Image (cartoon, rainbow, N blue to C red):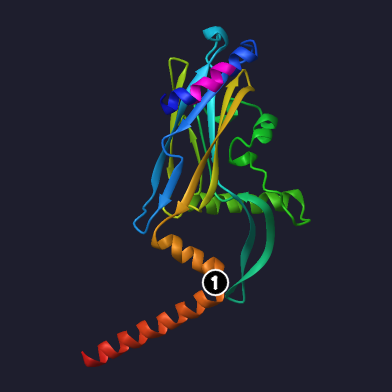
Amino acid sequence: MSRAARRLAPALAALLCLGAAKPVLVPDVSDDSVRILYSFAGDELLLFGAILYPGGIMPDRPADIAIVLKGPTESVIVRQKRKIAGIWVNAESARFRSAPSFYAVASSRPIDRLVDARTAFIYELGLDSLQMSPVSGALPEEQRRFKDGLIALKRRAGLYREEAGGVAIRDHVLYRARIAIPARVPVGRYTAETFLIQDGRVVAAAVREVRVAKTGFERLVAQAARRWSIAYGLVAVALSLVIGWGAGALFRRI
């Protein structure tokens, strides 16, 4: 049995058990493990799947699809720089407890045309609806300003993105989307969430996992830096001194 058939079988069983009451999503990804090597310059994930409607009957109006690829959350401190006496210094700051290290959303139409603001907030559909759990006791306006600043920084780094119209739906059943993975993508477990949206409501959802990991020499270096941080730092300093001394000796001979 093929991989697609194995994943389709549980969905068909779910339709039978539910009495064919609701549509079911059958999602998949082109590669559920992204390996980062020294030559890694970015990648592209293909997220695709099928919509199984009860009894095979299509709705009167075609449904929409939104796909969210989200990386592990992290605690982030955002600082605002201010120029004082001609010198740039750190001024106000805000900390967010659970900011996604990577976030990309692709949808068949713009999010604001699919759901209202409340639904978008519940499912974190779109950058404006991200829930980052601010820690500081600043006013909501200040928190919003720092959140917008963090999103802008992540977007410039290619780690946050929105692709309105990035999901193609064929024959109201098959869908697919391509999401770019930047070269400096954080490692960890990612979730690819697919939402079936109809008449402003999420009527079905499904999740697939994607793992981003370093392999080869990069993996060994990362593990050494994490497990033996002091030894790693001493070796790095020693290598820098040796390389600097060697370069100086070479130029003196030249």
Residue 100 versus residue 1 in the image, above or below: below
Q: 214 and 171: which one is in front?
A: 214
Residue 113 locus on image (x, y percent): 58, 25
Q: Is 134 positioned to the left or the right of 41 in the image? A: right
Whether 9 is among the magenta residues is yes
Residue 88 locus on image (x, y percent): 58, 72
The N terminus - image quarter:
top left
Identify the image quadrant of residue 33.
top left
Residue drawn at (51%, 53%) of the image: 186
Tell me where the magenta segment starts and ends, as one range: 7-13
Residue 160 locus on image (x, y percent): 52, 46
Residue drawn at (52%, 14%) of the image: 62
Residue drawn at (50%, 28%) of the image: 27
Q: Secondary structure at mark 1?
A: loop
Q: 18 and 66: which one is in front?
A: 18
Residue 22 versus residue 223 in the image, above or below: above
Identify the image quadrant of residue 248.
bottom left
Residue denoted by label 1 = 228
Most common SS among magenta residues? helix
Residue furthest to the front: 1
Residue 75 versus residue 88 in the image, above or below: above
**Does any portion of residue 70 appear in the rendered image?**
no
